[in-house]
C-alpha cells in the first residue's frame, strides 16, 4: 500500500565498542551486542537461513548455527528494495532475514519484560527494521523491542503454478521471526508469553494478517494495528487518473497469473531447448537485479489470500469472528491522506471547486458523488486539496478502521485511537505544498514512539503518554491512562475513540464515527462503480512520487 518506509524514523546510532559489550547466547549461537548505558542493542541477528539461490521463493528455514561469538554490533543487509522516494535502482540483498533487539541493560534483575515485535511499513516494497530506533520504548516502557526485516515485492509476494499458488513469503518470514522470539526472548530478559506484534501501514496490514492467519496461532498475545486495518481501501483515481481501486489483499490467483506472465516475459515460461529444470529453476537462476524492477516490485505488492497462511480475506474473517482472541489496539491518524495527495498535486491539481467536483465524479458513482460532495462541501475547507484529503482519509483509513474495531470488540478487548497532532513534525523529507499542510498525516505518529526528530515540550509529553499506553498494553493487555488524561477504555461505542494530541485536554475521548461521517462511508464505500478498478494491487509513495516529483 502507499506507505512510507520508516516515516519519521532514523537508523539506530551505534556506540563504539566498550570495555564490556554484552553477550547473549541464542539458540543458534552467541551474539555480541553494544551497550548504550540504559539499554543494549543486538543488531543483524539472523532469524532464518538466507533465501538465496535455490531457496529463493521457499518458506524460511532456521538459520544455520555458528561457532564462537557473532558480532551483532551493526544491522544486517536490508531486503532487496527500490527507493521509498523518487527515482533510483534497487538496493539491499536477498540475504536479509535479520532482526534487531533493543533491551534494557539490567536483564538479570526483576521479572521478565514484555516483548514488542515491530513490522515496518513501506508498501511491501521497501523498508527495514533498522530504520527505527526503539530505545525510548525499551527504556521508558521497560520492554524488549524487536524490529524485523522481511522479504519484499517480487521476492516476498510472488506467485506461480509451480509454487502451488502464492505462499506469502513476507508473512512466513514474519512468522519465522516470531518463532525466533518465542525461543529466544527470555535470553534477552523478555517474556515469551507476553509478545505484542505491532506495525504501521504495511506493518499494520501485516499485524491484521497475523490476527487471522492460522499459522500465527500462539505466536503473540496482543496486537497493535497502526494505519493499516484489515479493511483499508481507497477509491479509484484518488491520487492519479491511472490508478485503480486500492486493496492491499488480493486473491492468490492474481499473483499466480502475474507470476506466469512474468516468467514468460523473462524467458522462463519453459526450459530452453536442451536445458533441464522447471520455470522456477530458471527464475531462481536470474540475477536479483532482473527481478527488482519497479514494474515487478509493484506487481507483487499485494498480500494474497486463499493461501495456507491466509485462507480468507482478512476483513471478512474479522467480521465473521474468525481471528485469534487477543486484545487489540487499533487506530489511524486524522489526516492520513494529505501526504499522498500533496505529492500528486503538481501532476493532478485540484485548483478550484470545479476540479474538486470532477474528482468526485471520477472516483464515485453519481449518487455517491452527490452525497459525498454535500457532506464535504469544498467551501468548508481552506482549499479544495484539504477537502479532498479529508474525505479520502475518512473513506480509506478512519472509517474502515472503525468498522474493524467494532468487529473485533464483539469478541476481545479493543482500544481505538486517532492521532490528531496537526503540528506533528515531518521527518519524511518530502516537498511541502502550501495549499495542503501535512498536519497529522500518515506515519506522523512514528516520531512519538521511536527516537528520530526533535519534539516540542508538549509533543514530548504526548510522546511519553503514547509510549506509556503502548508498553502498558504490551505488559497487561490494557493501555491504562496517562497523567491528566481520561482512562483509555475498551471500545464500546463510537465515542470510545481516544484522540491523541499535545497540550492541555489534547488527550480526550471523541465520537470519531460521527466526526468522520462514517455512516455515509459505510453506506457508500467500499463498493466502487463497475469498471473503475484500474491497476490491481497497492501503490507506494515511490510509485506516485517517481511520476510526479522532479528528481
Image: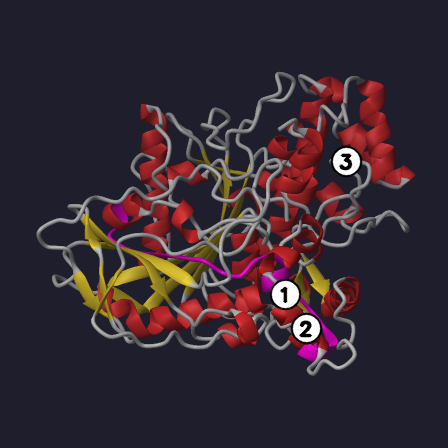
Give the image location of residue 246, x and y in percent: 73, 49
Which residue shows up at 75% across the image and 27% down it? Answer: 347
Determine the residue located farthest toward the front in the rendered image.
274
Q: Are marks 1 and 3 in contact (CB under 8 Å)?
A: no
Q: Nearer the viewer, residue 415 or 292?
A: 292
Give the image location of residue 133, x and y in percent: 34, 45
Disc 1 element: loop
Disc 3 element: loop
Mark 1, Cα crowd under 10 Å, few <14 / some 14-19 / many 20+, is few
Residue 429: within the magenta? no
- The residue wearing badge 3 is 240
Task: Please determine whether, in this image, residue 349 is positioned above or below residue 528.
Answer: above
Rounded to the nearest whole Å, what is the CA distance between mark 3 and mark 2?
Answer: 36 Å
Q: Tell me if 32 is positioned left or right of 359 in this view.
A: left
Rounded to the nearest whole Å, what is the CA distance between mark 1 and mark 2?
Answer: 7 Å
Give the image location of residue 80, x and y in percent: 53, 55
- The residue wearing badge 2 is 282
Q: Which residues are magenta?
A: 140-166
Q: Quadrant of the C terminus?
A: top right
Q: Are marks 1 and 2 in contact (CB under 8 Å)?
A: yes
Quadrant in the rendering for residue 155: bottom right
Mark 2, Cα crowd under 10 Å, few <14 / some 14-19 / many 20+, is some
- The residue wearing badge 1 is 286
Residue 164: within the magenta? yes
Amino acid at each position: 500500500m502507499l506507505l512510507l518506509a520508516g516515516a519519521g524514523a532514523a537508523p539506530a546510532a551505534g556506540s563504539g565498542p566498550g570495555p564490556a559489550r554484552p553477550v547473549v547466547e541464542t539458540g543458534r549461537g552467541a551474539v555480541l551486542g553494544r551497550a548504550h548505558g540504559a539499554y543494549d542493542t543486538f543488531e543483524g541477528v539472523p532469524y532464518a537461513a538466507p533465501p538465496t539461490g535455490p531457496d529463493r521463493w521457499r518458506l524460511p528455514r532456521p538459520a544455520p548455527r555458528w561457532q564462537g561469538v557473532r558480532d551483532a554490533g551493526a544491522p544486517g543487509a536490508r531486503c532487496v528494495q527500490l527507493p521509498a522516494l523518487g527515482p533510483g535502482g534497487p538496493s539491499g540483498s536477498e540475504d536479509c532475514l535479520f532482526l534487531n533487539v533493543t533491551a534494557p541493560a539490567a536483564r538479570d534483575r526483576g521479572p521478565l519484560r514484555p516483548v514488542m515485535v515491530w513490522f515496518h511499513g513501506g508498501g511491501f516494497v521497501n523498508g527495514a527494521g533498522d530504520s527505527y530506533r526503539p530505545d525510548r520504548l525499551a527504556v521508558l516502557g521497560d520492554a524488549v523491542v524487536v524490529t524485523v526485516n522481511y522479504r519484499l515485492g517480487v521476492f516476498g509476494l510472488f506467485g506461480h503454478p509451480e509454487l502451488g499458488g502464492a505462499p506469502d513469503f513476507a508473512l512466513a518470514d514474519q512468522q519465522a521471526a516470531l518463532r525466533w522470539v518465542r525461543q529466544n526472548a527470555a535470553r534477552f530478559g523478555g517474556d515469551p508469553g507476553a509478545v505484542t506484534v505491532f506495525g504501521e501501514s504495511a506493518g499494520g496490514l501485516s499485524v491484521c494478517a497475523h490476527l487471522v492467519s492460522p499459522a500465527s496461532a500462539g505466536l503473540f498475545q496482543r496486537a497493535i494495528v497502526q494505519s493499516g486495518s484489515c479493511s483499508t481501501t481507497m477509491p479509484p483515481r484518488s491520487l492519479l487518473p491511472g490508478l485503480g481501486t486500492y486493496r492491499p489483499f488480493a486473491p492468490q490467483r492474481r499473483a499466480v497469473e502475474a507470476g506466469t506472465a512474468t516468467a514468460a516475459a523473462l524467458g522462463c515460461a519453459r526450459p530452453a531447448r536442451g536445458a533441464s529444470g522447471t520455470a522456477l529453476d530458471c527464475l531462481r537462476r536470474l540475477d536479483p537485479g532482473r527481478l527488482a524492477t519497479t514494474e515487478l516490485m509493484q506487481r507483487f505488492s499485494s498480500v494474497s489470500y486463499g493461501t495456507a497462511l491466509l485462507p480468507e480475506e482478512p476483513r471478512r474473517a474479522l467480521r465473521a469472528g474468525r481471528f485469534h482472541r487477543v486484545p487489540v489496539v487499533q487506530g489511524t491518524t486524522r489526516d492520513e491522506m494529505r501526504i499522498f495527495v500533496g505529492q500528486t498535486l503538481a501532476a493532478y491539481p485540484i485548483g478550484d471547486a470545479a476540479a474538486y467536483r470532477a474528482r468526485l465524479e471520477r472516483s464515485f458513482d453519481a449518487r455517491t458523488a452527490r452525497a459525498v460532495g454535500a457532506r464535504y462541501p469544498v467551501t468548508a475547507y481552506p482549499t479544495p486539496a484539504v477537502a479532498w484529503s479529508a474525505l479520502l482519509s475518512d473513506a480509506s483509513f478512519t472509517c474502515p478502521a472503525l468498522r474493524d474495531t467494532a468487529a473485533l470488540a464483539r469478541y476481545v478487548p479493543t482500544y481505538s485511537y486517532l492521532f490528531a497532532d496537526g503540528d506533528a513534525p515531518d521527518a519524511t523529507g518530502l516537498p511541502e505544498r502550501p495549499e495542503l499542510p501535512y498536519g497529522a498525516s500518515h506515519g506522523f505518529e512514528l516520531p512519538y514512539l521511536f527516537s528520530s526528530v526533535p519534539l516540542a515540550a508538549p509533543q514530548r509529553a504526548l510522546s511519553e503518554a503514547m509510549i506509556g499506553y503502548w508498553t502498558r498494553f504490551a505488559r497487561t493487555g490494557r493501555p491504562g491512562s496517562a497523567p491528566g488524561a481520561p482512562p483509555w477504555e475498551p471500545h464500546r461505542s463510537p465515542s470510545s475513540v481516544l484522540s491523541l494530541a499535545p497540550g492541555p485536554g489534547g488527550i480526550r475521548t471523541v465520537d470519531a464515527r460521527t466526526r468522520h461521517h462514517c455512516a455515509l462511508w459505510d453506506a457508500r464505500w467500499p463498493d466502487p462503480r463497475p469498471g473503475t478498478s484500474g491497476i490491481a494491487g497497492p501503490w507506494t509513495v515511490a510509485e506516485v512520487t517517481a511520476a510526479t516529483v522532479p528528481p
